[in-house]
Image (spheres, rainbow, N blue to C red):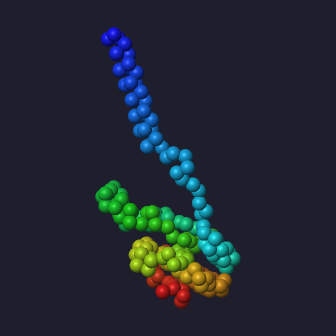
Amino acid sequence: MRLGTLAVVAIVAAAIVVVLAAVVASKRQPAAGKVRGRPLLTANEHDFLGRLEAAVPELRFHSQVAMGALLEPAFPKKLDPRAYMSIRGTFSQKIVDFVAQDRTTGAVIAVVELDDRTHDAAKDNKRDAMLKEGGYRIVRWQSIAKPDPAAIRRALVSQPQAGSGPSPVEKSPAVR
C-alpha cells in the first residue's frame, strides 16, 4: 500500500511540475495573435513623402527615424554609464517623421515633421530643443496645409546645412 501511495504522490507531483513549467513558458513567449504588423506610414505621411521626394530629388528621405539614431549623450558611456543611459532614455524611443539627407555627402539637411491634430505643442518644443542641441534644423508643416513643391524646395535646399552648429527651429507659416 505504501508503494501505491508513493506512486500516486509521484504522479501528482510530476503533473504539478509539468503544469508549472507550461505556465512559466507561456509567460516568456508572446502567444500567437498578441502582435500584428502595421503600415510604416499613414496614408497622409506616404503622400507627403512622395511630395518631398518629387520636390527635392537630390535629397534622400528617411521616414519614421528613431531619435536614438540621430542623438547621443554628450559624454562617453564609460564616464558614467547610469547617467548616459538615463539621458539616452529621454530621446531614444521618440520617432521623427522624416530625415532629409544629402545623397552625395550623407549629411543630414533637416528633420521634417508633419504635424496633425495629435501633435502636442509642449512635447514638440521639447523634442525640437533636443534636436536643435544636437545641431539639427527642424522644419514643420501642418498636415492640413501641406506645402507645394516650391515651398518644400525653399525650406530644404535654400537654408543653411546641418552640421554648421545649432540653428533655429524653422516652422512653416501654417504652424502654431
* Side of 144 relative to 20 (left or right): right
* Left or right, 98 with reference to 120: right
Task: Name the spot of residue 78 as percent of width and height, x first.
Answer: 33, 55
Residue 168 appears in which quarter of the rendering? bottom left
User: Which image quadrant for residue 80?
Assistant: bottom left
Direction bottom: furthest residue: 173
Rendering coords of residue 64 (x, y %):
55, 66
At 60% from the left and 69% from the top, the residue drawn is 42
Query: Measuring 54% from the left and 88% from the top, which residue is drawn there?
Result: 174
Tell me if residue 8 can be seen. Answer: yes
Seen from the viewer's position, the closer of residues 152 and 57 is: 152
Residue sitting at x 38%, y 24%: 12
Image quarter for residue 126? bottom left
Which of the pair 13/150 is nearer the observer?
13
Q: Which quarter of the rendering shows the N terminus?
A: top left
Give coordinates of residue 176: x percent, y percent. Answer: 48, 86
| Viewer-nearest residue: 18 or 79 | 18
Q: What residue is drawn where x is 46% and y is 66%?
A: 94
